[in-house]
Amino acid sequence: MTKLSGKTAVVTGAAQGIGKAIALRLAKEGANVAVVDRNEEKIIQTANEIKELDKDCKGYVLDLKHTEAIAPLYETIAKDFGRIDIAVHAAGVALTKDFMEITGSDWDFVMDVNAKALFFCVQQAAKQMMATGGGRIINFASIAGKQPTKPDLSVYGASKAAVLSITKTAAANFAASKISINAICPGVVHTAMWDQIDSDRARIYNQPIGKAIENITGLIPLGRLAELDEISGLVAYLSSPEAEYITGQSINICGGMIMS
Ligand SMILES: NC(=O)c1ccc[n+]([C@@H]2O[C@H](COP(=O)([O-])OP(=O)(O)OC[C@H]3O[C@@H](n4cnc5c(N)ncnc54)[C@H](O)[C@@H]3O)[C@@H](O)[C@H]2O)c1
């Protein structure tokens, strides 16, 4: 019997990177997993890898910026699996562009996914959990939501600050329903998102590929990027019985890049 046996988890953004690592980790801890992403080919791949672990898993293809489809999505998942105990919201996008060049559509591109879609995912996860006596919600923010970013990640930082606010407000509102809600703030993890930032900065600042990651690594007191296993391990802990008393928190996992 593993820690999360009998639980059902939903993970958004599970086609690759952090979300995929979390989906696999929660399955290894015993959970059945519903995986959600806009990337059909890759989400099927994630679902197949989880099924190989002998866990019930189903992939759902949705571009979460269509927020009207989020309530039907969570209803379908609750019907398919019987309940939702854990919801991890990792779907997100970044945009590397100078503060002075940001347009209204740039703002919407980032905010629609990172803040607006996440809000409705939290709302609908909480609705399903209230019906079954409680649960855990874990939202992906970033240290970029807590401190100034380079000026080329301004909207991303604003969207992650929104995640922190949504997390605290939801945690206060749904505590009485036994739903614990926390945010994770990673520093830097080497995923497709950071490859994109690195190649954008290579183009914008006329520097070699790899330089942006090298530069940011130099700012990390522990001297290295985070491993996917370290992020998914924190999610597994926050999903576990031992973490029942933790709610409304934002937990930095950033090698000491920020300390508050
Ligand atoms: N990688 C890092 O260093 C880092 C640091 C801090 C926070 N984060 C956050 O962690 C989360 C995961 O990041 P990652 O590095 O794995 O990124 P990633 O780009 O590798 O993966 C993001 C996933 O989200 C999905 N997604 C994006 N927009 C979507 C939409 N509209 N609808 C459905 N799915 C969508 C993508 O298809 C992809 O599978 C994000 O919220 C990110 O902001 C990452």
Image (cartoon, rainbow, N blue to C red):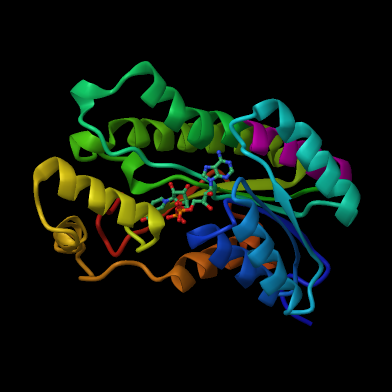
Residue 70: image x %, image y %? 71, 34
Which residue extends farthest top?
Answer: 104
Residue at 19% x, 40% y is 150
| In-image side of 259 versus 45 (left or right) | left
In the image, residue 44 above or below residue 159: below
Q: Position of residue 97 (x, y in %)?
A: 25, 33
Q: Position of residue 28 (x, y in %)?
A: 67, 77
* Residue farthest toward the bottom in the current orientation of the protein: 1
For the point 79% across and 51% down, the residue is 84
Any magenta on residue 206?
no
Closer to the camera, 184 or 53? 53
Left or right of residue 81, residue 98 in this image: left
Check the image and name the residue furthest to the left.
206
Q: Main secondary structure of the magenta part?
A: helix
The number of callouts visible is 0
Residue 45 at x, y = what percent?
A: 65, 66
Q: Write down the quadrant of residue 160 in the picture.
A: top left
Using the rendered image of the protein, determine whether residue 66 is visible from the camera's viewpoint: yes
Residue numbers of the magenta segment: 120-132
The N terminus: image quadrant: bottom right
Q: Residue at x 42, y 33 (%)?
A: 159
- Tell whether 229 sits left or right of 200: right
